[in-house]
Image (cartoon, helix red, strand yellow):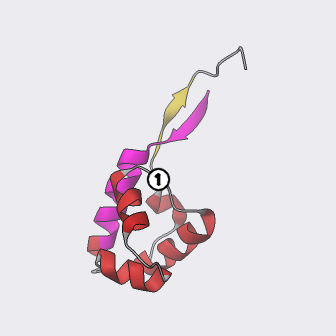
């Protein structure tokens, strides 16, 4: 069994950490140099995860570690047929 990243909980965590840091979505958009805020909204909704590079930057901007951002759920059984 391997742990899995909980996308929804991670997204909620990003929202909470962003607000705690006093940053808006527009602030993050500007810092990342994104043309639109869609990627950030996808992270917050649990529809996508930041790339590793963006996760490093996000952690720096929020004043936390990458481990503080990602929420891991309990392991699930491996599919033996794979």
Label 1 crowd bin: few (<14), some (14–19), many (20+), radius 10 Å: some
Res. 23 in view: yes
Q: Residue 81, percent across and down?
A: 71, 14
Quadrant showing the N terminus: top right
In the image shown, does 79 or 20 lie closer to the viewer? 79
Res. 21 in view: no
- Residue 7 on the magenta span: yes
Residue at x 32%, y 55% (from the top left corner): 12
Does residue 68 lie above or below 74 as drawn? below
Q: Residue 49, percent across and down?
A: 50, 56
Does residue 72 lie above or below 32 as drawn? above
Residue at x 46%, y 78% (from the top left corner): 34
- Residue 22 on the magenta span: no
* Residue that mark 1 sits on: 48
Count of numbered labels shown in the rendering: 1
Residue at x 33%, y 71% (from the top left corner): 18
- Find numbered disc 1 in the image and state the secondary structure of the residue it sits on: loop
Q: Residue 78, percent across and down?
A: 64, 22
Query: In this rendering, would 44 be left or right of 80?
Result: left
The magenta stretch is 1-18
Quadrant showing the C terminus: top right
> In the displayed image of the protein, which residue is found farthest to the top?
81
Query: In this rendering, would 64 be left or right of 9?
Result: right
């Amino acid at each position: 069994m391997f742990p899995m990243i909980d996308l929804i909980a991670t997204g909620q965590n990003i929202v909470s950490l962003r607000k705690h840091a006093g940053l808006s979505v527009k602030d993050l958009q500007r810092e990342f140099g994104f043309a639109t805020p869609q990627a950030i909204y996808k992270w917050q909704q649990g529809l996508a995860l930041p790339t590793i590079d963006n996760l490093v930057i996000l952690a720096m901007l929020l004043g936390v570690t990458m481990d503080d951002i990602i929420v891991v759920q309990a392991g699930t059984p491996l599919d033996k047929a794979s």
